[in-house]
Amino acid sequence: MTAPFLDSNVLVYTISKDSRAERAYDLLRNGYVLGVQTLNEFANVARRKFELTWPEVSEASARLAVHASSIMPTEIEDHRRSFQIAERHRLSIYDSLMLAIALRADCTTFYSEDLHHGLVVEDRLTVLNPSAELSPYFNSHSCSAALWNFHVRCGPAITLR
């Protein structure tokens, strides 16, 4: 069994003061798989909703990457497979792409708050909502403190070249 695949919404909690941040850290501590696309989506939200600077986004992404069990690139076969997943499960192409990447990584668990809890894709990948019972809102006003908390919990950064 491989480590679970984490969707970008789980990563976003690591830079928020949301009550779901602790659950996100629990998932990070236990090993995880990411897609390059996951990091791209994380960067987009970090910039747009949390107004992090590019250096802050780069550092946060590097910390997430260095602690991942595996980081999967997006391949053309993932793109093709995502159409089948999108049609079968009535999902967006973006969510379907992430699921296709997780399937290629042989993950059996996909943590996300954007997809239906308990959804099973291709009889082997189960979507779980890590915090279904908690509030769906971020507290973006305290991002600096959250970013500091992320630094403390996730250790030293790596330098991206």
Image (cartoon, rainbow, N blue to C red):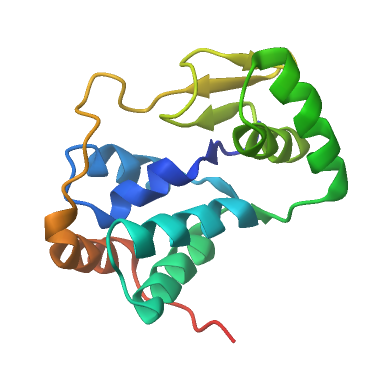
- 113 in relation to 52, above or below: above
Q: Look at 27% across and 60% down and name the residue there.
A: 50
Res. 106 visible in picture: no
Q: Where is residue 39 drawn, in percent x and y?
A: 53, 58
Name which quarter of the figure residue 58 lies in: bottom left
Q: Is residue 157 left or right of residue 125?
A: left
Image point (30%, 26%), residue name = 131
Q: Is residue 28 left or right of residue 70?
A: left
Q: Quadrant of residue 40?
A: bottom right
Residue at figure coordinates x 24%, y 37% from the top left = 20
In percent of the image, x 19 and y 53: which residue is there?
140
User: Does residue 96 show up?
Assistant: yes
The quarter holding residue 92 reads top right
Q: Nearer the viewer, residue 27 or 35?
A: 35
Q: Is residue 59 above or below residue 141?
A: below
Q: Is residue 44 above or below residue 34?
A: below
Q: Position of residue 90 (x, y in %)?
A: 64, 17
Quarter occupied by the C terminus? bottom right
Q: Quadrant of the N terminus?
A: top right
Q: Nearer the viewer, residue 95 or 30?
A: 95
Report the residue that reaches farthest toward the bottom: 161
Where residue 28 sits in the image (x, y, percent)?
Answer: 41, 48
Position of residue 159 measured from the top left corner of the image (x, y, whole percent): 50, 84
Q: Nearer the viewer, residue 132 or 87?
A: 87
